[in-house]
Amino acid sequence: MTECQYLNRGQIGVYYPLMTKLTKDDVLKLARLARLRLSQEEVEQFSKEFTEILAYVEQLKDTDTEGLKPTYQVNGLATVTRSDEDINYGTAQKDLLSNVPRTKDGHIQVKRMIG
Amino acid sequence: MSGWNEITKIADDVNSGRVSAKENVKKALSAIEKNKEYNVIISTLEEYALARAEHIDSQVKSIKSAGRLAGVPFIVKDNFLAVGSETTAASNILKGFKAPYTSTAVMRLEAEGAICVAKANLDAFAHGSSTENSDFMTTKNPHDKTRVPGGSSGGSAAAVMLDMVPFALGSDTGGSIRLPASFTGAVGLKPSYGLVSRYGVIAMASSTDVIGPITKTVSDAALVLDVMAGKDLLDSTTIDREASYTNLDCSLVGTKIGIVREYFGEGLDPEVKSVIETAIDVLKKNGAEITEVSLPSLPLALAVYYIICPAEVSSNLSRYDGQRFGHSVKDAEDLLDSYEKARAEGFGAEAKRRIMIGTYVLSSGYYDAYYKKAALVRSKLIREFNEAFGKVDFLLGPTAPVTAFPIGQNIDDPLQMYLIDIMTVAANLVGVPSISVPAGSVRGLPVGLQLMARQKADAELLRLAAAYEGVR
């Protein structure tokens, strides 16, 4: 018995039957969207883990949220503005470029994007 | 003497010339050196700190005061950009990244004379509850080297409890300040969302990220908050602050505290439960009015969090693309190759996991079912919290369902690891302040008591925590 036996998932929240099965193909598609290159092992491991995690979070689908609006942020602020003036942040261009892997004439150099 | 005085005394000693800032910095550096086996520190800022100390000492000589935190050494979690230091977020993708500017929180503390001496270990990008997800090392719990200190601010909590410094900064997105505080016996404060500027702190989940202090006493936490809190032009999510957070005079008599029923279900370790029940008795004996409240949607909070958090993480981590900073690939074939390889090589497993789950729940066809639904249930949770605060002024529960678990126990089971956050995530989703204070221990392992107050009622919360600390 592990020390976390009382944390058995069946006791915390409800454990729904697996609604969504993520195939290896699904995982590869997601990896492409997220610009991540995964190894074969990672693809297998992640598709197993995601299926479990998604089963857990899917509990929400039957929750009654009638009459509610979604909350995306909790400080009650919206469209915070400042005056349209130049601000000197005290950080020089060279400082901000100091971590760039490849620069040329003060520009950030990247692979060809168009054509 | 190995321990530290409370912060006001440390600053007073420096400002009066009784103790030099240099002495304090040397003491901190020596404690860091002595405790290497605990894997707490990623990098030390020895040269910087000693130079700062010299500056503070000469300031004291000339104008007799270097600020409210004069000569007080502190440590920050390595997701805080600070004073040109290497800032890694404990991830290989940022190894060697030097901070080109300093976070507002650190600037405000240093403006009052505090001295940043080191960067502490964390779960990489703050993804985790134990520091086992750090790409570099796992921090050990000061009470038991075979156990985790909690996470993700595990390094910060261990630093304070090993007496390296009197306070450390952490970040709390789902419990990452409060959980390690609970596991190590520290005080960990998660202020109201927006109260402390996040400028210069590596973002995890922008609608729940909060930064706060880890200390040994409530009054120390209150002072650090008082110095850091307040609107910042550089962080447009910051809110107005109260005038002072350091007035901690408070009587427990008549204080209305609600015990959250849903926190005391089957998932709570019975021995942890018993420590919390003792704390409740202490509060009752000292005049608090304790009632039971219910937050019926609380069991869903973790599911809401593990949709919203990865979604926001997937967005925030998209900037690590190997083009402008961080790990990059020298022999990429084309742009896509340079993105995919840099990210694959630099990110650890948990970062990848969260990015992909986030990508999934935000992708077209799934957005409504997952992310929007989670945002709706979040509103439901907020409504229930507001209803509860209509009846009581504070909410109470354990900080964690367990005490510090052994290193390696949960690392192969991500979902099991996520369940450790079950008590803490609600406060992040709702935006209310929450504090973990030491309440006792189970077989030598600390147990934290979690107290929550209404949004923006941080001063009140600190008063309650101080009052409990005084009678515990």
Image: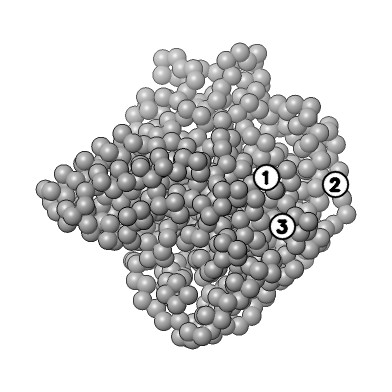
Chain of the residue under the numbered disc 1 shown in the image: B
> Chain for mark 3?
A
Report x, y in % for residue A21: 86, 43
Residue A103 is left or right of residue A1, and the answer is left
Per the image, label 3 sits on a secondary structure element best described as loop
Question: Residue drawn at (41%, 29%), measured in percent from left and top?
Answer: A96
Q: Which residue is mark 1?
A: B408
Q: Is residue A51 above or below residue A24?
A: below
Compare residues B59 and B355 and report the one nearer the observer: B59
Q: What amino acid is found at the position of numbered circle 3 in the picture?
A: Glu
Q: Secondary structure at mark 1?
A: loop
Residue at far left of view: B62
- To the question of a shared chain for discs 3 and 2, the answer is yes
Q: Is residue B51 visible?
A: yes
Say if mark 2 contacts mark 1, CB within 8 Å.
no
Same chain letter for marks 3 and 1: no
Label of residue B352 in the image: none
Give the Cα distance between marks 3 and 1.
12 Å
Relative depth, front residue between B1 and B123: B1
In the picture provided, is B167 more to the left or to the right than B314?
left
